[in-house]
Image (spheres, helix red, strand yellow):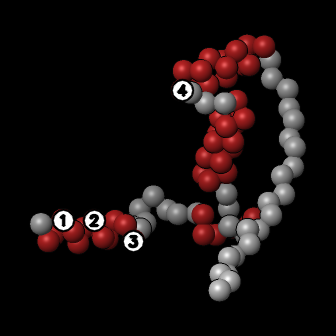
Amino acid sequence: MATNIAKKKKIKYRPISFKVTERQKSIIDAYCQMHGLGTVQLLKLALKEYLEQHVSSHYGNDELVISENQLTIFDIIRELESDEA
């Protein structure tokens, strides 16, 4: 019997290039070596964190904007579990 396997959606990657000074590059390299990261991995993490903090409804990503005081479903579950204990 054949199984229905969902095909992965192809992700299109676009190259981005920019220049940094020798000092900035040495700081990035030292940080990456200290924390066991690659340069590209570090830059992707930094960019992702920045976008999560500064995204707005203007870009159509309302679900990413969460207020600091807003509860998540996980907060409610933790509260219920602590009340039972």
Give residue 52's position: percent from left, percent from top.
Answer: 62, 53
Q: Quadrant of the C terminus?
A: bottom left
The residue depicted at 56 percent of the width and 27 percent of the height is 36
Asked whether residue 85 appears in the rendered view, the answer is yes
Residue 82 tag number: 1
Q: Earlier in the sequence, mark 3 or mark 1?
A: 3
Please name the amino acid that badge 1 sits on.
Ser
Residue 9 tag number: none
Marks 3 and 4: which is nearer the front?
A: 4
In the image, 72: left or right of 16? left
Q: CA distance from mark 3 to mark 1?
A: 14 Å
Q: CA distance from mark 2 to mark 4?
A: 31 Å
The residue depicted at 68 percent of the width and 83 percent of the height is 2
In the image, 59: left or right of 29? right
Asked whether residue 50 appears in the rendered view, the answer is no
Give residue 76's position: percent from left, percent from top.
Answer: 32, 71
In the image, 22: left or right of 43? right
Q: Give SS at disc 2.
A: helix
Front in this rendered view, residue 29 or 54: 29
Front in this rendered view, residue 43 or 53: 43
Location of residue 21 with respect to 69 vertically, above or below: above
Please name the amino acid that badge 3 sits on.
Ile
Q: Which residue is mark 3?
A: 73
Q: Quadrant of the N terminus?
A: bottom right
The answer to whether the residues at label 2 and label 1 have Cβ atoms under 8 Å apart is: yes
Q: Which residue is mark 2?
A: 78
In the image, 44: left or right of 15? left
| The quarter of the displayed image where residue 3 is located | bottom right
**Label 2: few (<14), some or many (≥20) within 10 Å?**
few
Front in this rendered view, residue 30 or 69: 30
Q: CA distance from mark 4 to mark 1?
A: 35 Å
